Image: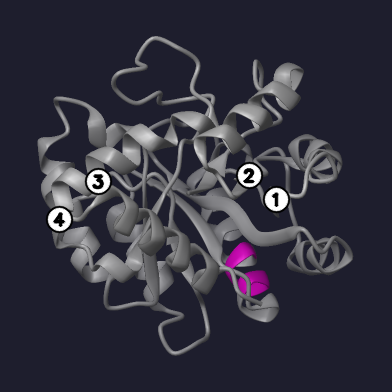
Amino acid sequence: MIDSHCHLDHEPLFSNIKDVINRSKKTGIKKILTISTNFKSFENIKNIIQIDDIIFGSIGIHPHESSNDIIKTDFIIEQAKKYKKIIGVGETGLDFYYENSEKKDQIESFIKHIEASIELKYPLIVHSRSAEVETFDILNNYKNTDLKILMHCFTGSKEFAKKLMTLNTYFSASGIITFKNSLELQETFKIIDNDRVLIETDSPFLAPIPMRGKKNEPSFIKYTLAKLSELKSIKFEDLDQITTNNFEKLFSQ
């Protein structure tokens, strides 16, 4: 198993990182991708990726932070090339549900990340909430490029998923697919091609059933994989291999 999206720089994961990594390994996790959300986060991640061989990182500014942390395309490229274990660009995208950043700032930041992703040939890690039309329209502008897209913690509509599948898009399932009220999302993951699916925890957030109420961590990813296995009628071990292969293909450099 590979946890394609978590935040090891957040508490309580960071203070207990050695125990978190040990539990991850015992669960069968081979790699963990810890995600940058702002400049301070990236500074921490540069150190975290040195702690263990299974930890990798990304560079990017979350849409919530895009009015405060103004990032440049050249900076993303420079830092990604400097640190070999930085393998993805993001978390970027659009979030119009909250008004933590101006829409224009989010869009400008998103485009800068896209340009860096194409230049580096690294996957673009996308957060999209209440912005399906705008997210797709921007990504679709780069349809004829080498852009590789990873829709993190995908919770979008079936129509959005179908449109994204016309691009070079992968979809990451989080603990949300285990929730009882996520019936529409569960149906959507059934129609997403098996060779385009990854799994993630987004820990310390979104703990899956049966761990609801606890702080999430990478070792809990087995519950998300089990639910996805049920939805897709694929054996747990087989889907484990499929999602692992998908990650390795997407993040190959």
Element marked by disc 2: loop
Q: Distance between the residues labelled 1 and 2?
A: 6 Å
Q: Magenta span covers which residues?
A: 113-117
Give the residue number, with chain letter if any, for mark 4. Answer: 190
Q: Which of 136 and 172 is in front in this view?
A: 172
Q: In what quadrant of the picture does the C terminus appear?
A: bottom right
Up-down relation of residue 189 to residue 182 (above or below): below
**Circle 3: element type:** helix
Q: Name the residue under label 3.
A: 228
Prevailing secondary structure of the magenta residues: helix
Q: Residue at x 52, y 45 (%)?
A: 3
Label 4: few (<14), some (14–19) or many (≥20) C-alpha neighbours in 10 Å: some
From the top left corner, tell me how far across and down residue 161 is, in percent: 23, 61
Of pointers 4 and 1, the one earlier in the residue sequence: 1
Residue 127 in sight here: yes
198 left or right of 130 in image: right
Task: Decide if residue 100 is in sight here.
Answer: no
Residue that label 1 marks: 57
The answer to if 34 sits in the magenta stretch is: no
Which amino acid type is marked by label 1?
Answer: Gly
Rendered image quadrant of residue 166 = bottom left
Name the front one of labels 3 and 4. Answer: 3
Q: Nearer the viewer, residue 106 or 161?
A: 161
Q: Any mark on residue 35, and which?
A: 2
Q: Which of marks 1 and 2 is nearer the N terminus?
A: 2
116 is within the stretch colored magenta: yes
In this rendering, position of residue 95 left or right of residue 123: left
Q: Distance between the Cα atoms at labels 2 and 3?
A: 23 Å
Which numbered disc flags the more N-terminal residue, 4 or 2?
A: 2
